[in-house]
Amino acid sequence: MAPGSTRPTSRDVAQAAGVSQAAVSLVLGDKWRGRVSATTAQRVRDAARDLGYRPNLAARNLRLGQTRTVLLVVPALTSEFFAGIYTGAARVAADHGFGVVLYLSPDGIGPARDPFASAQSALAGVLASSMAADALTTIRGDQLPLVMLDSDPTGSLGAATVNLDITDGARQITRHLLGLGHRHFLHLASDVPSWTFHVRAQEIARRIGATPGTTLRTAHTPISITGARTAAEAALATPGPRPTAVICDDDQLAAGAYKAVRRLGLRIPDDISVTGFDDLGLATAVDPELTTVRLDAELFGERGMKALLAVLDGRTPDVGDIPVHLVTRGSTAPPNTP
């Protein structure tokens, strides 16, 4: 290692392996075949490993006029779901020599402020989760490859769209509750005007409306436990047939519904069944544990990053929505009606 250095350099590797720095660059850049022998290449790799050397990809990319950084845009940094997407995306990105920069654009509606001003050239592409397409025009400019997650495939500006099967998730919930005998429903719906919540509302209304003798109330709420409690409490106290089942757009809203039900002196699931969406850690922290739709956020992130890498490589990404699964727990039961 060079005197006074705290981090090994390519020169250190060259000295340890007894080769030139040019040879080190060829080997670690995987361009050695036909230029150096296999024995020499292995000696360089062994020296780099023993020294703990890691090439400076940023400097290398600047020299080559390339970038290997992807921007992941999400509406919230505190959500367990978006954390899972990042984990899955970053894992795939790392396997292909890419880094991921996480950026927040609240509510997913635009326009989002460009975190790099006019420096779009610093990015290889953009992966955006649960965002409106027009929220990304500033970030993307007219140049960057874009893959949308959890977005309308018919109106996307992206080169590809990757979705969970949200329609089937709503279908599984309504089929479960209707099968238990519920006929009076409250849909505790997110007030975020995004494609994913529109799809849930549309499928819930369609399925319940197709069953004779049903009623459906809808109460819109911010995605927060406090907001959901307030909205659910008001909706459940509205005159008319009281809902025996509350369908929530995500697990946080379900936690708010739990609070509202108990404030009204009712019991879950004896008086009212409650369902969620996402299967966050919160789903098993509440009592009774929550019946909800499991969305595999890490797989979602992996599939999204693979789609973006395919676009960058000039290939057609895989198609098909990612399956989702209803997890039945203690928050749902047949209605206790006269």
Image: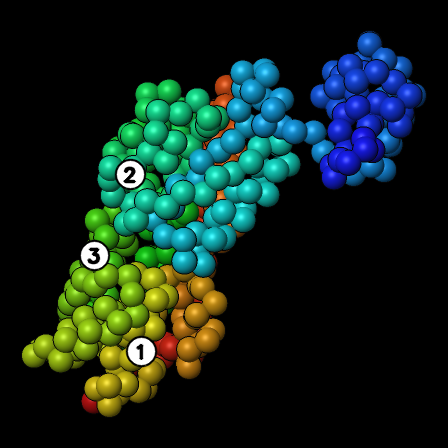
Q: Which residue is mark 3?
A: 191
Q: Nearer the viewer, mark 2 or mark 3?
A: 2
Residue displayed at 32% across by 57% down: 170
Q: Quadrant of residue 52?
A: top right
- Residue that label 1 marks: 258
* Residue drawn at 30 percent across, 70 percent down: 225
**Quadrant housing the C terminus:** bottom left
Query: Which quadrant would the N terminus be assigned to in this image?
Result: top right
Q: Nearer the viewer, residue 155 or 21?
A: 21
Instruction: Tell me, yes or no, if residue 47 can be seen here.
Output: yes
The image quadrant of residue 141 is top left
Asked if disc 2 and disc 1 are in contact, CB closer than 8 Å, the reply is no
Residue at position x 41%, y 47% in the image:
164
Residue 171 against residue 31 in the figure, above or below? below
Q: Taking 196 as reference, is 257 above or below it?
A: below
Q: Nearer the viewer, residue 130 or 41?
A: 41
Callout 2–callout 3 Cβ contact below 8 Å? no
Residue 332 vertical position relative to residue 122 in the rendered view, above or below: below
Q: Residues within 10 Å of mark 1 (few under 14, many from 20)?
A: many
Give the amino acid type for the residue marked by disc 2 in the picture: Ala
Q: CA distance from mark 2 to mark 3?
A: 19 Å
